[in-house]
Amino acid sequence: MTARTTDVTASFAFSASHHDGTARLGRFTTPHGVVETPAFMPVATHGTIKGLSMHEVSAAGGQMMLSNAYHLYLRPGDMMVRALGGLHAFTRWPGPMLTDSGGFQVFSLAKLRTVQEHGVEFRSHLDGSLHQYTPESVMRIERNLGADVIMQLDELIAGGAEIEASRSAMERSLRWLERCRLEFDRIERDGRESAPEFTVSPGAPPLDTFDAVLDLVPPTQALFPIVQGGTHAELRRASLRGILDTGDWVGVAVGGLSVGESKPDMYAMLEVCEPLLPREKPRYLMGVGFPDDLVEGMRRGIDLFDCVVPTRMGRHGTAFTPDGTVQVRQSRFRTDRRPLVEGCGCPGCTHYDRAYLRHLFVSEEMLGLRLLALHNVTFLLDVTRAGREHLRAGTFTSWSTEWLARYRAKGKRIVESDDE
Amino acid sequence: MTARTTDVTASFAFSASHHDGTARLGRFTTPHGVVETPAFMPVATHGTIKGLSMHEVSAAGGQMMLSNAYHLYLRPGDMMVRALGGLHAFTRWPGPMLTDSGGFQVFSLAKLRTVQEHGVEFRSHLDGSLHQYTPESVMRIERNLGADVIMQLDELIAGGAEIEASRSAMERSLRWLERCRLEFDRIERDGRESAPEFTVSPGAPPLDTFDAVLDLVPPTQALFPIVQGGTHAELRRASLRGILDTGDWVGVAVGGLSVGESKPDMYAMLEVCEPLLPREKPRYLMGVGFPDDLVEGMRRGIDLFDCVVPTRMGRHGTAFTPDGTVQVRQSRFRTDRRPLVEGCGCPGCTHYDRAYLRHLFVSEEMLGLRLLALHNVTFLLDVTRAGREHLRAGTFTSWSTEWLARYRAKGKRIVESDDE
């Protein structure tokens, strides 16, 4: 094992070419390719975008995928993913990838978690087994998985938390960021931990990617810090200052939003952060969101988004449309031969009609879930693509105003209550 | 409404170009295209092949699809399918289609069924509502649905039934065939029943295919009789004689097999029927089957097959391979980066490896079900395609012998118990 010094900044780059207010059109370069921003990242929690193939999402315009370190750590194991060639080889997605640390999942899925300064102890939501997550162990996990961008471990609190609880979690997240950074750099310098031997049963082929396991040199990755602070402007500013004081980050994420607070509160926090966020770095709004949240986020200078909502709502029969969300099981679609969304290029809209989509859901047929999940992902990819086109054309502000007015106006009439 | 006289035989044709023993290579012409036989028909029970899109199955080599009159009668309703343009337009499958009458489903799914000479009274497996199926009503349903080939209503009995019960059901099936034929011809002559008005809610578009509802002229269809008689050779012969005495059928189906009897019994019944089946007509073995059943069926002169097994087993994690079936959840696949079946052209085998497929099933991810269902359908389509190629080359008998030996020999070692 030889140590190496990689100039991470040479493998990652960001530049914005067009601006309209605080919105911007950019290019985020990663070791696995370029992402045109603003961009929505479909979520492959367990290394697969629920119900969809990477080919379908790529054909729909997906540029960068997100996976979850918590889920992959539990199953099949981060060392196993590394043994199988890393996250890109495992999922067969050759493009840019990001792993969330799993902090959110530990705080929302795991059982009996106890948070201390050292880290979080929790029981797996799968089998109740006991695990410990520390800033250092999360870095080792994410460096085994091998995504291009990896996220720090942070402490999460409920959406409407009081200022003292928010401050405490924000400050701990800053201390954990520093520990993440030290461990990230240590692995860069000293290499990854040595791999366990994997048992290969008699008759099975040798583990042909065992070289990857033995390769202790970590892939080229960027660690993103996460701005916390709940819905308290002064905490958000303090979090951002703390982050920018401690490192020259490749990009910065805004977390702890879309977790129960109101939409105006979320947008207000973005407006608090925007002037302090470095202009020359990509900005990632975590876990957001709905179509209107993407447009509002783009207006406030966000470059990257992710959310499980499009696939989850699609599985439940709710579709995004330019006029708000629609539940396809409605009986009014029984005889409706129009495409779900006129002009949408997804297979559900170009090959099938509303009557058939309704039939698939009423009959509980898997093809319905697939088609609607892909439609919703396509819809969010299209919203960010339209945002990019209008930024390039200098028409972003007027387009986004009209887009939001239509989505919300007619939405009042046909929107279903969300099934989230 | 004007009556018409269609020469059905002009729209349907069958010719066999190559023979090897009793196996034959043929072309079955239907109003919606030609099927090269022997062929496996994937099953779209509710108008969709479970988990798959018609595009995927077409790309895998699917030529003719099967749907189920019982399921579509209950939901969305045969008259609704007719209103939406018929089964081809509804499912967006432009090629040849066949509907099973649903007799099998009435006898296996419905609750509280009572069979009388007039027909079957049953309660829906969906909501317990009361329905009556007669030979005449089934013809009206299947002519509303509009598949190219439609099946008679027959009486089904359990696999190992005694000869008297088998004889009684076989003879009733012959009487019902005659009533089906009379109603089929009457509809051809007098037209379809007039359609109910469909309620179109305010704001919804007019039913743009209402012309199809109003069109009382039935599509060009062929009615297939079904040979019954359980596992009793003399009953099978009597059934076939009865069928051939009463009409000049476009094709003939063999039913009531693969319902619990042993495989040798099934193959023996095919050997009983084969010499009596008209050489110049396609022969359809209903509800069969497994890969080896297809090869055994081809050897015994069968031209068409259908079965839900490939998608059902795929959803449960069992894959067809040339060496028998395999359960992909097995831990020995945990680190196995080989394709599931070397040389298979399906997306699961060309894009992914065994370790990832196992991960998808262990994580209960929908993509796993999709990939394995498509693999299994592809496998059966490939088996019949290989049969056709070897018939053309004159090497069918030796190929099929070797194929069966490999499937069964190694199968002994790695076959899983079927999850059917």
Image (cartoon, coloured by chain):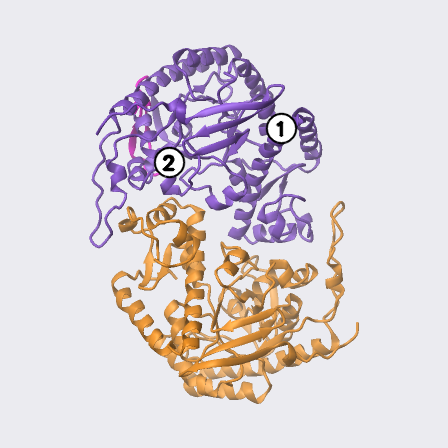
Chain colours: A purple, B orange
Q: Nearer the viewer, mark 1 or mark 2?
A: 1
Residue A373 position in % (x across, y down): 54, 43
Could you classify mark 1 by the number of other residues whose Cα lies within 10 Å: few (under 14), some (14-19), or many (20 or more)?
some
| Above or below: residue A144 compared with residue B51 | above
Magenta segment includes A31:
no
Tell me how far mark 1 sits from mark 2, CA to CA. 38 Å
Query: Could you tell whether B367 is left or right of B5 in the image?
Result: left
Looking at marks 1 and 2 on the same chain, the residue that comes earlier in the sequence is marked by 2
- Image disc number at residue A371: none
For mark 1, what is the residue? A392
User: Which of B33/B72 is in front?
Assistant: B33
Question: Which residues fall within the magenta stretch?
Answer: A116-136
Residue B147 position in % (x across, y down): 61, 68
- Image disc number at residue A71: 2
Picture quadrant where residue B34 is located: bottom right
Magenta segment includes A121:
yes
| Above or below: residue A354 compared with residue B176 | above
Which corner quadrant holds the N terminus of chain A?
Answer: top left
